[in-house]
Image (cartoon, rainbow, N blue to C red):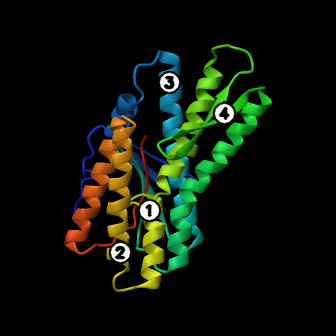
Amino acid sequence: MTTLVDSPDSWFGEWHFRIFGIPVRVTLWFWLVILLIGGEQGPGPMAAWITVCFVSILLHELGHVCAFRLFRERAEVVLYGWGGLTIPQRALYGTLPRFVVALAGPFTGFLVAGATLLAANWSGASVQIGFHLFLPVLRVLPRTPAYSLWYVLINDLLWVNVYWGLINLLPVHPLDGGHAARAVFEQADPANGPRKALILSAIVSGGVAFFAVLEHSLYLTLMFTILAVSSLQLLDSGGARTQAYRSPRR
């Protein structure tokens, strides 16, 4: 069934291209949402933000595609209003293949974050660790007070590839952690596994939305409220399987 987090079937204003033979489709909503959540920034920081979001989310989805190819399955990538989406030509079966594919996207982002930290260290910056909601956030600061677009770029890369990557590992449908959790539940209980995974998804989504309200995070409140409703929609419909692998927004 169609839920609130599905990609709309619209071709207006889309950009189509191939990278390493992989079809990529970028919707107009992808750019509009990036601009919206980027907030009020100057031209330089906004350009850095848009570039980081596009490259990071694309690499995340290409990580999924490479994992699919490891199991001899082709897939295409869609970047849309909810982030990224990797759609295989055929459903992938087996707990291990599904688990590996689900984690390949966040793992790719963590590799990007590792390279970013090396670059930050090379530039002489210091790294601070904080928390947003219940997840760690990495922030890079210059050793002497100074403004530089370089540090804006580094911090955007860390935010998207670390924080979003950790968000994506939560056992929430249709995030990557939700796919991994479903594969494990179905392995343990083929009959009721999908239902149990969706129940967990709804509970975790509701919990994150609650904490987001306490932290006055409007975006995360809306995002996880919608994800909770989506999980309940699928639960009510019998938990139809989907194997589109997604990367979330902030």
**Residue at numbered disc 4:** 128
At which x and y percent is residue 8? 25, 50
Q: Nearer the viewer, mark 1 or mark 4?
A: 4
| Vertical side of 208 occupied by 64: above or below | below
**Gap between marks 4 and 2, in whole Å?**
38 Å
* Amino acid on which disc 1 is placed: Pro
**Gap between marks 4 and 3, in whole Å?**
24 Å
**Residue at numbered disc 2:** 196
**Residue at numbered disc 1:** 171
Q: Which mark is residue 47?
A: 3
Q: Quadrant of the N terminus?
A: bottom left
Q: Nearer the viewer, mark 2 or mark 3?
A: 2
SS class, disc 4: strand
**Gap between marks 2 and 3, in whole Å?**
42 Å
Q: Are marks 3 and 1 in contact (CB under 8 Å)?
A: no
Say whether disc 1 or disc 4 marks the residue closer to the N-terminus.
4
Say whether disc 1 or disc 2 marks the residue closer to the N-terminus.
1
